Amino acid sequence: MSTLPKFIKIRQIFPRPLIGDITQTVKNELAVIDIENKIKPGQKIGITVGSRGIQNLLPILQTTVEKVKSLGGIPVLLAAMGSHGGGTAEGQKEMLDGLGITEDAIGAPVMTCADCEIIGHTPDGLPTYVVKSALAVDGIIVVNRVKTHTSFKGIVESGLTKKMVVGLGGPKGAQQFHGFGPDELSRLLVEIGTVLLNKLPVLGGLAIVENAYEETAKIVGIKKEGLIEQESAVLLYSKSLMPSLPVDNIDLLIIQEMGKNYSGTGIDTNIIGRARIQGVLEPTKPAIKRIAVLDLSEESHGNATGVGMADFVTTKLVDKLDRKAMYLNCLTSTFVVRAAIPMYFDTEKELVDAALYSLCSIPVEKLRIVVIPNTLFLSECLISEALLTEVSDPTRFEISKDNQEVSFDEHGNLNLKI
């Protein structure tokens, strides 16, 4: 077995704005978009739901549903998931069930749909797709988390506009949007989003911002008028709360689990400094020589999109793959390298040995290793002793007094506790 250094547990300290009363905040922000005067009794109102795990999403949806009912409206949960769930209505329902988004839990029926129609065109003549279910409602409240995207940068990225363009665009809309490549996505998101705002009965939206601890930091009511500009301001705030790895230069990053519930790419490209997009330069930092991933989350339902950004994975991860779902996701996004399966090993011990063998020119005492649970929750992690001097700022880091010796159990699994 390759020799490993000792590890120290650290806690990163990030800015932590936090909403105390989710229900009351949602009510206040729905008032901002003047929901009281936009819903008439008997109208069917669609509330968008998607495939991402969002903190406090259930109470946010429950409160929105109750408000619609109080105004005499008929709320429905409108699946806005692009090609996720295998691009089928059945797959969408399975994913939403897994997130707890059901009629029993939220108080409104779930409408899943993968059939699309063209409802307009951009100034350049590009057709604008929307799922037929979105055309069967009298009003739409767009609900989504706003955060930086893993493949492109623009005035809006992941958020309300993308929920309409890619989510309500269904499989055809998602495929068309991603097919233009990362250089065009920012512009197209605004152009297609503008068409949808003009054609669909959007009442407004709720933009959710999470802090680095994945807690609800802010909920913003966004009016239909000027939605894109309002969302852009929320995006800037969201970026200011982004977590990060404790250091920028790493020899080996060990990720205990990847998955769609942590990032749309399974492994957040903004965290690891890798995008694997052909023709696009990789970020200069963080600079990570090797990335190893130990497992795939159950919430991913076998979709290991992003596995191609790792250098080493385990056989148990590969055995969980649903290649059909993963391939559809990566073919739709056009970032096909992200579905490439890296070297994989039967045990975590074999994986670690291989990773260290590839770094054998670096003395053990100088190895810069970081272990994280996933790329979403970064407040607590492990670092090798060589990094200790770089995390001395008490306003940014809390250092554990106990070192951890590396060992493996009888199955070859790594014994390190975060």
Image (cartoon, rainbow, N blue to C red):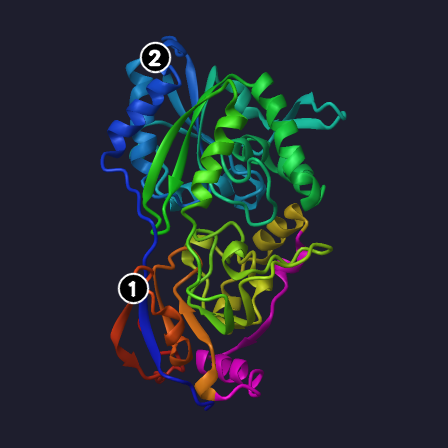
Residue type at tag 2? Glu
Q: Position of residue 115 (x, y in %)?
A: 60, 31
Quarter assignment of residue 68: top left
Magenta stretch bounds: 335-363
Q: Quadrant of the C terminus?
A: bottom left
Q: Where is residue 6 in the image (x, y as percent from the top left)?
A: 36, 83
Q: Identify the mark nearer the N-term, 1 or 2.
A: 2
Q: Where is residue 113 in the image (x, y as percent from the top left)?
A: 53, 32
For the point 60% across and 70% down, which residue is it? 342
Whether 341 is among the magenta residues is: yes
Q: Where is residue 366 in the image (x, y as percent from the top left)?
A: 47, 84
Quarter assignment of residue 306: bottom right
Nearest to the observer: residue 305 or residue 27:
27
Mark 1 closeness class: few <14, some 14–19, many ≥20 residues within 10 Å: few
Disc 2: which residue: 36
Disc 1: which residue: 394
Tell me: 163 left or right of 403.
right
Do the CB atoms of the residues marked 1 and 2 lie less than 8 Å apart? no
Mark 2 closeness class: few <14, some 14–19, many ≥20 residues within 10 Å: some
For the point 51% across and 58% down, which residue is it? 267
Whether 109 is among the magenta residues is: no
328 versus 42 height, above or below? below
Residue type at tag 1? Pro
Q: Nearer the viewer, mark 1 or mark 2?
A: 1
